[in-house]
Amino acid sequence: MSVDENKIAIQHVEDFDKVQDAQHDSEDLPGSLRGLNQQELATLGKWTTLKLDCIIMPALTILYIL
């Protein structure tokens, strides 16, 4: 396989993965989150990560010190 054919094959696989991810995004979400757009989901994800970090990291720090 030449270099150009390899690049085309890789691009095809990456495009296929993007299509598959887009199809699964709305199917995998619970009903309460399906109405949100991508920006709202990203904001909610960041907020949730921050909240979990604030809960879990102190406990892990204490366990590490012990």
Image: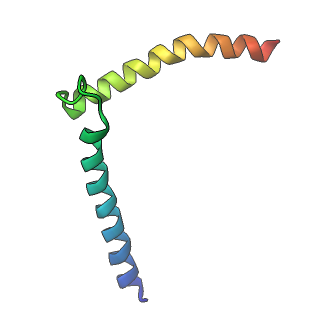
Q: Quadrant of residue 12?
A: bottom left
In this picture, is 34 found above or below 64? below
Report the number of numbered marks: 0
- Asked if residue 44 lies left or right of residue 60, the reply is left
Position of the C terminus, as image quadrant, is top right
Q: Residue 63: horizontal and vertical position, in percent?
A: 75, 14
Q: What sort of colour scheme is used for the picture?
A: rainbow
Position of the N terminus, as image quadrant, is bottom left
Q: Residue 38: horizontal and vertical position, in percent?
A: 23, 34
- Asked if residue 37 lies left or right of residue 4, the reply is left
Point 25% across, 49% down: residue: 23
In this picture, is 26 found above or below 42? below
In this picture, is 57 found above or below 16? above
Q: Quadrant of residue 15?
A: bottom left
Q: Residue 57: horizontal and vertical position, in percent?
A: 61, 16
Point 29% across, 46% down: residue: 24
Pick out the residue farthest to the right: 66
In this picture, is 61 found above or below 11? above
Point 32% across, 77% down: residue: 8
Point 63% across, 10% down: residue: 58
- Asked if residue 64 lies left or right of residue 4, the reply is right
Q: Residue 49: horizontal and vertical position, in percent?
A: 45, 22
